[in-house]
Image: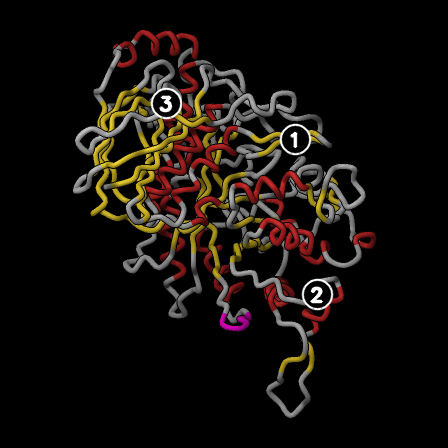
Amino acid sequence: MAQNHSSRRAFLKASSLAAAAAALRGSSSFAQTTLADAHIEVLPAEPIGTIAPELYSHFIEHLGGVIYDGVWVGEDSRIPNVNGIRKDFIDTMRAVQAPVLRWPGGCFADSYDWRDGIGPRGKRPARTAFWSQQDTNAYGLHEFMHTCRAIGCEPYLAANIRSLPARDFYQFMEYCNAPAGSVPSNSAAPAVPNTLAAERAANGDSAPFNVDYWGVGNETWGCGGNQTPEEYASQFRRFTAWTPTYKDRHPRFVAVGPNGDDADWTRRLFASLHSNPEHPRLWGLSVHYYTSGRADTFAEGDALRFNDAEYYDMLARAGFMERIITDHWAAMGDSNHRVKLVVDEWGAWYGKGTELGPGYNLSQQSTMRDALLSAITLDTFHRHADKVGMANVAQSINCLHSLMLAQEDKFTVTPTYHVFRMYLPHRTAQAVRAEFSAGTIDNPLAVAATPVGGASAVGSIRQKTTLAVLSGSASMQGKTLTLSVVNPHLTQPRTTEITVRGASIASAKGTVLSEKDVHAHNDFAHPDAVKPRAVSIKQPTSGRLTHTFPPASISVLEIALA
């Protein structure tokens, strides 16, 4: 979890938001009414890559109400639970087929000792955690693994390299993955059980956890130690050298990448890593990008109270993910591209004002605007399915860009949850190129600004001056085409002709998520205020489809090809 780091400095304030909103509504680019003037062409013969289910992964951290009251309620709670884990959390994660869950952080990871969270719960130490809150360690390693098993997802562990030595990382891996029972030794001595595996068994899990994904630190440019890329490269090599491998399960190490679009960090990191003839065991490069509620100051703006100009500005800057991916892909300098990008923290980050209650640090309400941001981001990952190996929305529950909100026995899903459900047909399909011809929307809050102290995420975002009228992605499985389309315009529908190059459309069905008011959201009293609905689609004519995408909408069309 990112902090208010120096790389996220405030910039010159934009002109009055009210004036900007008035200018927006009066500009010619918004005043036009367009009918049947948009076109989408899908090109199945131009594949991009398989859309990995891991692009829809998740993240939980010991922060505010995420773990305690969100995920963990305890076995004796009156709240329905499975071995202490909130049942609604498990059911919701299963409903979106969560592939991977990242834990324990975030910034929390680099002050966390994994040994504090094992053994009898009543004997675990209580500590002041990174976010200045007391952590009883009631939820630890075994509880997290049981959560993953209940969901049916893979664990992704973020290891502490700021405050623990390399030996602890090695033993962390051994505790998780060493096989149970006796193992042969390399001497004449009899086979003996692995001590850490025996300790794991004594704590309730004799079978190994088989953890494949290992984050080697977190945000080492900030809360993970304020390191330079060269300093971190040395740490990465030291922590990952000669780590244990069991039953040919080679660990997938994820190195700490930059904040936002700081491509200089990536270039320097890879240059330093490869300066050593012993090439690093590197599977992925972590990249973090939060879309803040205001472009001029990080983590400002309100999750519920925003005007038209702020709405368009937020979604325009969500599209900045495209540049982050392409810039770092180029900066990695790996001609074989064996290392993938791992966007393991992404989402909207607003200022205070909509928290669930005291102690729910960084919880915020989620509206239709956040659903649109989610769709824009997921479509970006699809368009770069050859580059992005995993992405983890931050976070799953009760924090920032959540799919769920929970407080004691109250529970609701957010509009973002529905986007994850709607996009399920894309997973494991082949992403293919699609051309969207619909023009752009001006972002009146985009003001040219020179980033202070380097190309920070916030500084560069200010230069995102336009937003696509229609955007989306396409994927193929057999003769089924899945097309997701975002229309961000607040008032104008887009009647669009859809064609598939080299193929004819036989039929289609669709789902849409839209509301008349983009401030619409679900809360405990109105858990179904925002939800998707099926839409009727006209029969194709001459193998082409014409469909109208409503204002401020996310649509997923499942198209059968003749």
Position in image of residue 194 (x %, y %): 67, 75
Position in image of residue 519 (x %, y %): 50, 18
| Image quadrant in which the N terminus is located | top right
Q: Amino acid at mark 1?
A: Phe
In this picture, residue 124 sits left or right of residue 23: right
Q: Amino acid at mark 3?
A: Pro
Query: How far is the residue under mark 1 from the one under mark 2?
Result: 34 Å
Above/below status of 38 relative to 272: above
Which residue is under mark 2?
Answer: 200
Rendered image quadrant of residue 506: top left
Crowding at dot 1, Cα within 10 Å, few <14 / some 14-19 / many 20+, comes out as: some
Crowding at dot 3, Cα within 10 Å, few <14 / some 14-19 / many 20+, comes out as: many
Which span is picked out in magenta?
A: 244-248
Which residue is under mark 3?
Answer: 488
Query: How far is the residue under mark 3 from the one under mark 2?
Result: 51 Å
Instruction: Name the residue rendered at 21%, 31% in the picture.
Output: 544
| Label located before the other in sequence (1 or 3) | 1
Mark 3, secondary structure of its residue: loop
Mark 2, secondary structure of its residue: helix
In this picture, residue 552 sits left or right of residue 139: left
Is residue 250 something one can see in this rendering?
Answer: yes
Crowding at dot 2, Cα within 10 Å, few <14 / some 14-19 / many 20+, comes out as: many
| Label located before the other in sequence (1 or 2) | 2
Which residue is under mark 1?
Answer: 411
Query: How far is the residue under mark 1 from the one under mark 3?
Result: 28 Å
What colour-coding does the image apply? Answer: secondary structure
